[in-house]
Image (tube, rainbow, N blue to C red):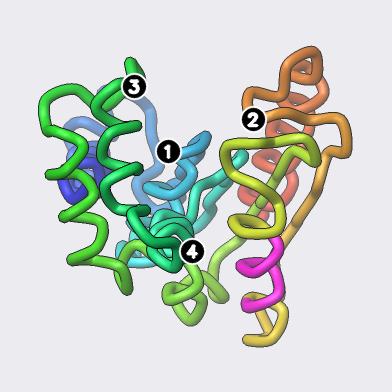
Amino acid sequence: MLHVLEDVHAVVEAISEPAFAARHRLDPNRIALVGHSMGGFAALVTGSENERVDCIASLAGANLGASARAAMDRPGAAEAMAASLDSWSGPIVGPSGHEIVSEVLAHLDRFDTRNHVAPLSGKSLLLVAGGRDDVTSVGLHHTPLVAALEAAGAEDVTAHVIPLGDHSFSGLRISLATRLVDWLEGRCRAR
């Protein structure tokens, strides 16, 4: 998980290089990160840590720290989570489930998106969740972050729960894409 964050930081730095930015017609002073699920987590955490990033969209974004804390309240949860990751054919390849769980537990504070509220409060944020998401549930991953941002006085937060949305927003991707593009063109372009 730490490598995911390092990779996003590396990409932001790479696209900010003057030669790269000129060659690809990018404005390195206006960088937006957009991510889904673990990518939403990575966008929020690295975007909070990188001053070059102005806008962050997290779609069904995970809060790995909160998720691990909630799971650890149950006996045998770490072992069950490791076994589940070992049998998973998702995007993480290489480390064992035990290695992933150990890394998350060692970095709970950094991996909890609510701990990044202060730097996130100064950025334009789009937070979208699916009401039927059984992977990154609204109650654990979305609502607590939105509440923490509101309590911190964040001024540029656009938060939506799409009631019929599942984790991948099946059947709703065109409306989600439209919402994202409208936000990018409206909120980020104005920054």
Q: Residues within 10 Å of mark 2 (few under 14, many from 20)?
A: some
**Distance of label 3 from label 2 (alpha carbons):** 16 Å
How many numbered callouts? 4
Magenta stretch, residue numbers: 143-148
Q: Which residue is mark 2?
A: 167
**Distance of label 1 from label 2 (alpha carbons):** 13 Å
Q: Which residue is mark 1?
A: 39
**Distance of label 1 from label 3 (alpha carbons):** 17 Å
Residue 50 spot, x, y in % from top left: 31, 62
**Distance of label 1 from label 4 (alpha carbons):** 20 Å
First reached walking from the N terminus: tag 1 or tag 4 = 1
Q: Which residue is mark 4?
A: 70
Residue 135 spot, x, y in % from top left: 57, 37
Mark in the foreground, 1 or 3: 3
**Residue at 40% in and 42% down:** 27
Q: Which residue is mark 3?
A: 88
**Residue at 63% in and 23% down:** 168
First reached walking from the N terminus: tag 2 or tag 4 = 4
Q: Based on the picture, tell me whether residue 131 belongs to the magenta stretch.
A: no
Above or below, 74 against 36 in this view is: below
Mark 1–mark 4 contact, CB under 8 Å?
no
The amino acid marked with disc number 1 is Gly
**Distance of label 2 from label 4 (alpha carbons):** 19 Å
Mark 1–mark 2 contact, CB under 8 Å?
no
Label 3 element class: loop
Q: Based on the picture, tell me whether residue 145 belongs to the magenta stretch.
A: yes
Label 1 element class: helix
Mark in the foreground, 1 or 2: 2
The amino acid marked with disc number 4 is Ala
First reached walking from the N terminus: tag 3 or tag 2 = 3
